[in-house]
Image: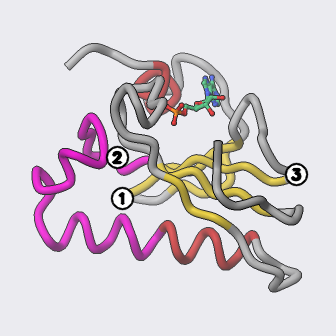
């Protein structure tokens, strides 16, 4: 698998504004925020995208999703809601080939997405 910008953040080769770091996941602010709060969550065990979720064990995948939930809940202090997005593949406009959950909150989000 090619080294991505998120591998470099994980290896501390480039800086990021980290909001959560534990043995399973890393969460940091998106450099090009699309909402007042826009955080990305990656599992430390790399897979390319949502398509590859089956490459994680049930325990690893379960922990990842639960930690996305935990981080989102803690960001959402006003309890006004948030959106979780996994872009996948070309039509999904995935630009970084390291799975990442986008957590977006802090404004009224629109539906449908573009
Ligand atoms: P996606 O288009 O779903 O693959 O999302 C990739 C996201 O990574 C985009 O929202 C980018 O703004 C974000 N991004 C790219 N480089 C960095 C970086 N160095 N630090 C934080 N976020 C980044």
- 10 Å crowding of disc 2: few (<14), some (14-19), many (20+): some
- 10 Å crowding of disc 1: few (<14), some (14-19), many (20+): few
Q: Is residue 27 left or right of residue 106?
A: left
Q: From the top left corner, tell me how far across and down residue 22 is, in percent.
A: 46, 59
Q: Nearer the viewer, mark 2 or mark 3?
A: 3
Residue 36 is tagged as: 3
Q: Nearer the viewer, residue 78 or 86?
A: 86
Element type where label 3 sits in the image: loop
Q: Which residues are magenta?
A: 42-67
Q: Which residue is mark 2?
A: 44
Q: Which residue is mark 1?
A: 24
Find the distance from the CA under tag 3 to the CA under tag 1. 26 Å
- Quadrant containing ligand 1 reads top right
At a point 44% along the width and 25% down the height, the residue shown is 96
Asked whether disc 2 touches disc 3, contact meaning CB atoms under 8 Å apart, the reply is: no
Which quarter of the rendering shows the N terminus? top left
Element type where label 2 sits in the image: loop
Find the distance from the CA under tag 1 to the CA under tag 2. 5 Å
């Amino acid at each position: 698998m090619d080294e991505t910008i998120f591998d470099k953040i994980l290896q501390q080769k480039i800086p990021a504004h980290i909001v959560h770091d534990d043995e399973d996941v890393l969460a940091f602010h998106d450099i090009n925020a699309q909402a007042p709060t826009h955080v990305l969550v990656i599992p430390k065990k790399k897979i390319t995208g949502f398509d590859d979720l089956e490459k994680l064990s049930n325990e690893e995948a379960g922990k990842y999703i639960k930690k996305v939930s935990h981080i989102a809940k803690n960001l959402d202090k006003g309890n006004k809601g948030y959106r979780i997005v996994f872009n996948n593949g070309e039509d999904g406009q995935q630009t970084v080939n390291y799975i990442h959950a986008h957590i977006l909150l802090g404004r009224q989000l629109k539906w449908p997405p573009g």
